[in-house]
Every structure is written in structure tokens, then in C-alpha cells.
Amino acid sequence: MIKDSMFFAERTIDEYRDISLPKVVKEYLLFKGTRNKKGEAVNQRVRPKDLCSSALFVYKLKDNATNKSAVVYYCERAARRMGSMDGEFIVINEEFWNECDKYNNKMTQGRDRKEDSHG
């Protein structure tokens, strides 16, 4: 059981193993993006440690060494159990990545047009 002091706000999980990798990956992809400025696909493979800030945010965990280590461990563990590890990278399921890409595209269409019109 995680101590209440490890959270910024109300407890969101009872144990680190309750961390949902798909939930963390989705937050990561929606925050970091699925395409670069050239429109090329990015973030189809991520390191478990790269998911750390997204997991801390999703679960309202404080940014400390214990939480970071646990998040990395349990994200990697979940990925290995799902068979989505390739070396040191988690390979994002194509269908899941496409779903996030579609959402990101929808949310940025208006913003891109505004940026283009302002020069």
C-alpha cells in the first residue's frame, strides 16, 4: 500500500501495481503528441522512464525518487506481460496509437489554421 503522503491530492490508487499502462500511455501521447512538425509519426516506441511524468500526473503522485522508480518498474512490468517490450522500448499498439493520433489531429486542426493565418 502506498502512503497517503505520496499523493498531492486524494489517493487515486492503492498500490503501484494498480497503475494502468494504457491510461499512462494515452496521457503521454496526448501530451507529447503523435506527429512532429513535418507530420511524421512519432512516439510509437517509448522508454518506460519517458512515461514517468505522465503517470505521476494521471495518478496525482508526488515527484520523488520512490514514486518515479515504482512507476518505471510497473510500466515496464505491464509492457513485458503484454509482450510489447522491444529491447528497452515499449512498442505502442498501432490501433491504440492511431486512436490517439486521430484525437490529436482533431484537437489541433483549428489551432494549426489559426497559426497559419497569423504568419
Image: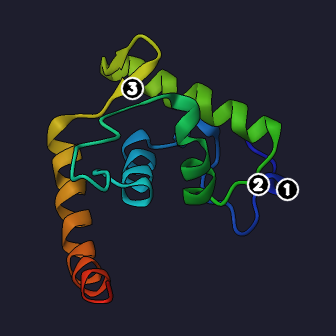
Residue identified by numbered label 3: 90
Q: Secondary structure at mark 2?
A: loop
Judge the density around disc 3: few (<14), some (14-19), many (≥20) Cα neighbours within 10 Å.
Answer: many
Q: Amino acid at mark 1?
A: Ser
Q: Give the left or right position of residue 6, taking residue 51 as reference.
A: right
The amino acid beneath tag 2 is Lys
Of the residues tagged 1 and 2, which is closer to the observer? 2
Q: Secondary structure at mark 1?
A: helix
Residue to which mark 2 is pinned: 62
Q: Upstream in the sequence, badge 3 or badge 1?
A: 1
Residue 5 is marked as: 1
- x, y (%) of residue 109? 20, 76
- Name the colour scheme: rainbow
Looking at the picture, tell me which residue is in the foreground, 104 or 13. Answer: 104
As drawn, 68 above or below 23: above
Which label sits on residue 118?
none
Identify the mark nearer the N-term, 3 or 2: 2
Horizontal arrangement in the rendering, residue 10 relative to residue 89 (left or right): right
Q: Nearer the viewer, residue 18 or 56?
A: 56
Sequence-wise first label, 1 or 2: 1
Q: Quadrant of the C terminus?
A: bottom left
Image point (54%, 51%), residue name: 54
Q: What amino acid is found at the position of numbered circle 3 in the picture?
A: Ile
Q: Is label 3 or label 1 in front?
A: 3
Residue closest to the far front: 119
The residues tagged by marks 3 and 1 sit, at their Cα atoms, a distance apart of 30 Å
Q: CA distance from mark 3 to mark 2?
A: 24 Å
Residue drawn 26% across and 77% down? Answer: 112
